[in-house]
Amino acid sequence: MSDTAKPLLIKRYASRRLYNTETSDYVTLEDIAGFVRSGRDVQIVDLKTGDDLTRQYLLQIVAEHESKGDSVLPTNVLTDLVRSYATNMQAVMPQFLAASFDMLREGQTKMMENFAGMAGPMSGMPGFDALRKQQEAFMKTMMGGMPGWGASGPAREEPEAKDKPEDLAEIKRQLAELQQKLSKL
């Protein structure tokens, strides 16, 4: 089993400092978020008690991102989550959420496969390559740190100069061109 296949062990000391056992250095909550976004599973344990603190720290990462305006969870979803703790839904909620994320990953992967399958007959059309690259960039942004999608993995890449927002008008123009040609077919 390779080192990246097993969870990265992070130990929390009594001082609340977090220690990466692979690199023998201290890490921050943001470092841990980076490991997770890159597809690496982590396990955070209290050095003294051996208690698994992974859920606590992952929830803290989510809470910090939500408080900074990186909102992913709508208020009604958060409300339903809080309510689920007081009802018999508490037993069903983990499986439901896991299945929902699995379906999202599967759907995105299939969409990318279908889009790639269209490349053959449509690759000669003006603007198709730009549209394909824009779709890939969109999917990378949307799926962000979700492991298991695409061959390049979940790590975010810096967009190429031609994929930056300044070229959005050009991409929109090419997309409109492509849509006109598709409607004629």
Image (cartoon, rainbow, N blue to C red):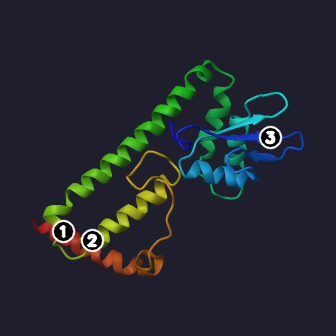
Q: Is residue 60 above or below residue 82?
A: below
Q: State left or right for residue 11 relative to residue 118.
A: right
Callout 3 touching callout 2 (CB < 8 Å): no
Q: Is residue 73 above or below residue 96?
A: below
Residue 81: give x, y in percent of width and height.
63, 33
- The circle on residue 12 is 3
Q: Amino acid at mark 2?
A: Asp
Q: Amino acid at mark 1?
A: Ser
In the picture, which quadrant includes the C terminus? bottom left
CA separation, marks 3 and 2? 48 Å
Q: How many marks?
A: 3
Say few, some or many: other residues with alpha carbon within 10 Å of mark 1 (under 14 / 14 to 19 / 20 or more): few
- Residue 172, quarter of the rendered image: bottom left
Callout 3 touching callout 1 (CB < 8 Å): no
Q: Amino acid at mark 3?
A: Arg
Q: Secondary structure at mark 3?
A: strand
Nearer mark to the viewer, of 3 and 2? 3
Say few, some or many: other residues with alpha carbon within 10 Å of mark 2 (under 14 / 14 to 19 / 20 or more): some
Q: Secondary structure at mark 1?
A: loop
Nearer mark to the viewer, of 3 and 1? 3
Callout 2 touching callout 1 (CB < 8 Å): yes
Q: Nearer the viewer, residue 53 or 126?
A: 53
- The circle on residue 123 is 1
Residue 15: give x, y in percent of width and height.
89, 44
Q: Nearer the viewer, residue 185 or 24?
A: 24
Residue at position x 85%, y 44% in the image: 16
- The circle on residue 129 is 2
Residue at position x 69%, y 23% in the image: 86
Disc on the earlier residue, 2 or 1: 1
Residue 101: give x, y in percent of width and height.
48, 39
Disc on the earlier residue, 3 or 1: 3
- Residue 30, quarter of the rendered image: bottom right
